[in-house]
């Protein structure tokens, strides 16, 4: 990685690999399948219109599963970086995650952009309000605000527009370092961030178990499990 003195603003993108060691399946590990359905076929508005019970069960199962998991050393290290980096350098740290679990927050991160939404939110398609939600949606419970029985998972499906893209691109424009952790680089626009960052002059670093589809775009790749590679990288920065 380039001269550490020049690094002030850091943008971090995480994917399912950062939660893998917490026991949350990545999309690729299950071969991208769930009950013999390809995720791309379940995580879509069409699937929800065609078979709402299948889609609601898919998300009810995963929403319940994450509540039994704990953050791992990678989540905790990223929270430490967010806490100490600004004091040390006056620089900023922005964590953008593709993950819909809450392990970054439970690991101590306070500034997290969930560009693909969150399992623990339910989105009412009648009043448009998003409410914190821990239970199932399969029984079509009433919206806490307007009572309509029209709650859906607050998750960005394929073909839907990711959240807070304006803030993300603004941060990429100011980034001195872009770090991608635990993602296969298979899904856009997240997979394109490294190219955007590099064209805007940032250093780019990949921390992943194996080389990803976008590895060739990174100045540097460090391979290994996130629970080892991420804390080591954070210690190097905070030394
Ligand atoms: C959009 C929420 C326009 C849902 C997700 C052709 C037809 C139709 C659409 C498209 C098309 N071509 C491109 C598109 C666009 C499409 C897309 O990219 N499709 C792909 C399939 C080609 N994208 C969209 O539709 C997006 N919307 O484009 O709108 C637009 C564009 C720009 C600006 C404005 C508007 C919306 C996509 C969002 C879909 N929702 N998640 C849910 O969770 O159910 S995607 C989901 O899969 C994840 O969120 C993530 O983004 C993606 C990939 O998952 P990863 O996180 O990377 O996980 P994966 O398993 O793949 O990889 C894990 C990695 O970790 C591996 O590399 C592994 O080696 C590593 N790993 C494993 N263990 C460890 C580890 N690393 C470290 N330590 C370990 N222990």
Image: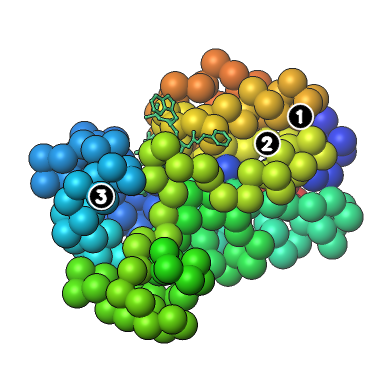
Q: Quadrant of residue 17?
A: top left
Cα separation between marks 2 and 3 = 37 Å
The residue singled out by tag 2 in the image is 178
Name the outermost residue toward the top.
216
Q: On residue 229, which mark appears?
A: none
Name the quadrant of the N terminus. Answer: top right
Q: Which residue is mark 1?
A: 202
Pick the residue in front: 20 or 44. 44
Above or below 238: residue 175: above
| Circle 3 residue | 49
Q: How many marks?
A: 3
Marks 1 & 3, CB-CB < 8 Å contact = no
Give the residue drawn at x 62%, y 28%. 194
* Local crowd size for mark 3, using a 10 Å CA cut-off: few (<14), some (14–19), many (≥20): few
Image quarter for ligand 1 equals: top left
- Residue at x 53%, y 45% (from the top left corner): 162
């Amino acid at each position: 990685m380039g001269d550490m003195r020049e690094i002030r603003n850091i943008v971090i993108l995480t994917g399912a690999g950062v939660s893998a060691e917490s026991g949350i399946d990545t999309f690729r590990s299950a071969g991208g399948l769930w009950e013999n359905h390809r995720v791309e076929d379940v995580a879509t508005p069409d699937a929800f219109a065609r078979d709402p019970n299948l889609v609601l069960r898919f998300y009810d199962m995963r929403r319940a599963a994450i509540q039994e998991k704990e953050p791992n050393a990678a989540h905790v290290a990223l929270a430490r970086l967010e806490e100490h980096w600004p004091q040390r350098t006056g620089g900023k740290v922005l964590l953008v995650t593709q993950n819909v679990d809450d392990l970054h927050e439970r690991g101590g991160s306070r500034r997290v952009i969930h560009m693909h939404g969150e399992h623990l939110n339910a989105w009412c398609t009648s009043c448009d309000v998003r409410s914190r939600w821990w239970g199932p949606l399969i029984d079509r419970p009433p919206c806490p605000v307007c009572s309509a029985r029209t709650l859906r998972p607050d998750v960005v499906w394929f073909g839907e527009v990711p959240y807070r893209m304006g803030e993300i691109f603004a941060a990429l424009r100011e980034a001195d370092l872009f770090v991608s952790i635990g993602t296969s680089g298979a899904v856009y626009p997240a997979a394109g961030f490294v190219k955007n960052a590099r064209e805007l002059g940032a250093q780019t670093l990949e921390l992943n178990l194996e080389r990803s589809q976008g590895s060739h775009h990174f100045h540097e790749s460090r391979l290994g499990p996130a629970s080892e590679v991420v804390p080591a990288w954070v210690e190097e920065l905070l030394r």
